[in-house]
Amino acid sequence: MTDVTDEVPVLIVGGGGAGLTTSILLSRMGVQSLLVERHATTSHLPKAHVLNQRTMEILREAGVADDVYKRSCPPEHMASIAWATSLAGPRPEHGRVIGCVDAFGGGSATATYAVASPCVSTNLPQIRLEPLLRQHAESLAPGRVLFHHEVSSIEQDADGVTAVVVDRDSGAVRTVRARYLVGADAGRTVGPTVGVRMGGLADLVDMVSCHITADLSSVVDAGTLIHFLINPDGDGSMGSGVLVKMGPEHWDERSEEWVFHALVPPGDTASYAPDFMPDLIRRSLGLPDLQATVHAVSHWRLEASLADRYQVGRVFLVGDAAHKHSPTTGLGLNSAVQDAHNLAWKLHAVLAGHAGEGLLDTYEAERRPVGRRNVERATTTFFLHMNIDAALGLAPDLSKEASWARLTRLFSDAAEDADLRERVAAAIADECHEFGAQNVDLGFTYTSSAVVHDASAEHVYADAVTDFHPQTRPGHRIPHAWLVRADERRSTFDLTGRGRFTLVVDVAAGAAWAAAAKSVAEQQGVPLDVLEIGGDWHDSDGTWAAQREVAPDGAVLVRPDQHVAWRSMTGHPAPADVLRSALRYVLSAG
């Protein structure tokens, strides 16, 4: 082993969404890190694109959200998902919409999503998000974000991790010594090196994606983000293809770029032919003369896998290094950003000396159950699309003419076809569990020693996928409420987080809690703020009061990741004692 040439608190391996977000969050909390990425540039494929409300809240905290919104799809242009036979074509059944659902907080869901978060969901493909994240990461950590550098070996001991890093341009080798290592390399090197295994299902189906520039302005709707084609000239819903709007200058019907995904038979060599995707796109869209510029074609296989561990000693896994799943429900990149958010504040707390190392054990305890749930949900929603084929009565052994005949019946007004129409409408309506999964996006909760759980009952949901219920029950994300000070309007998410704990209290009982918080913060060296609602900040529309679930003299302790750590349902005769005890428990401070 060569001499150590670089020492850093945190080494991040991988410069995709998870790694770059980790770098940004650590930098903003004052933690120095070094990021190394084996590729020379960020992703050259669109890949992940939908950013849900929780992810945008995190990017808002990271100072990135405004730049994302400037470049991404406005809500009104991603409010709908459509299933259609094609976009055009000679048959009466061509160019027909089979059904639509509201998506990502659009349409009838707009008000529900608006009251849940200060942020709207948006759409920005990975090829444009990652350069933006890289720019922010490099500006916060100049010279500490190294692309075209590769980790060739990793060793860890009781005090830290030693990695050998190779500059792939010059061949120069450096040895990096870090207190902790974050593996954000999609499972290529870090996980296998430390003995982590991925369990689950691999190679579920073969997919091919094609990134194109084409003018579809005369045949698409401005508000529809994704078109699923069900076309007998293709092969069912996934085989006929999925068309996704990608901007970048226009996000309405004038979108310049698109991605087209299609399921192909396992091991199908024909799909590797240069003209396969252009031909399939023209056939499925019903546009035989479409002029399209192909930027990239990628083949990939659907997985549903989860790492058996998220932590091995001083090594932590985030993003695709910890979980891999179908792109349906848009949980991949969103989960990665949320992994980074959960881990970053804990690394900061331990490195700053106000938390014990046991706090780091709660990363796996909290994020792995969420990862498992998201893998299962993504797999479920992928195969949910097959229910539409089944409702239509389409099957692989059905001839093209017989399949078109089923579609002819669907669009008829005949009374004898009413059952067919009802079955198809019900199957499409069920797609709200993919495109309106607000409780999946916002309602996940943490159970670990970094949360002081109380005896309150879990909320009972009518639909645990779509129905989101804001609450302060420990482990849950803090409810969003707009607070007003003079002419300033800020969300509870703007006044919490950012590497600090926050005690949220009502001004009527704020003095006792504020004095307690000041005493505890000074004694334990913990960054702890007090947010007195009704003082400088007013709950002008009563939203916080309706959601806080504690009495006016109670208190809610919010962690730096904006999840509730502890709450006191009422006032307490010794507020400093109970607050001190809660913080010591949460921070594994003994």
Image (cartoon, rainbow, N blue to C red):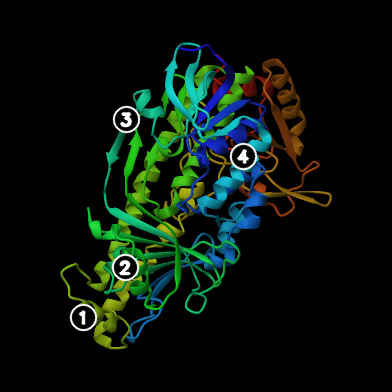
Image x and y of residue 357, in percent: 52, 18
Residue, disc 4: 550
Q: Quadrant of residue 424?
A: bottom left
The three-letter code of the residue at mark 2 reads Ser
Q: Which element is circle 1 on?
A: helix
- Alpha-carbon span between mark 3 and mark 4: 43 Å
Mark 4 closeness class: few <14, some 14–19, many ≥20 residues within 10 Å: many
Contact between labelled residues 1 and 2, with CB atoms less than 8 Å apart: no
Q: Mark 3 or mark 4, which is nearer to you?
A: 3
Whether residue 511 is visible, yes or no, is yes
Image x and y of residue 390, in percent: 24, 67
Image x and y of residue 103, in percent: 49, 63
Residue, disc 3: 197
| Residue drawn at (67%, 17%) of the image | 524
Q: Which of marks 4 and 3 precedes in the sequence?
A: 3
Q: Nearer the viewer, residue 5 or 355?
A: 5
Label drawn at residue 240: 2
| Residue drawn at (47%, 78%) of the image | 219
Residue, disc 1: 401
Contact between labelled residues 2 and 4, with CB atoms less than 8 Å apart: no
- Alpha-carbon span between mark 3 and mark 1: 47 Å
- Alpha-carbon span between mark 4 and mark 2: 53 Å
Q: Which element is circle 4 on?
A: loop
Contact between labelled residues 4 and 3, with CB atoms less than 8 Å apart: no
Contact between labelled residues 4 and 1, with CB atoms less than 8 Å apart: no
Q: Quadrant of residue 560?
A: top right
The three-letter code of the residue at mark 4 reads Val
Height in image: 301 above or below 432? above
| Residue drawn at (56%, 67%) of the image | 77
For this orientation, the residue located farthest to the front is: 170
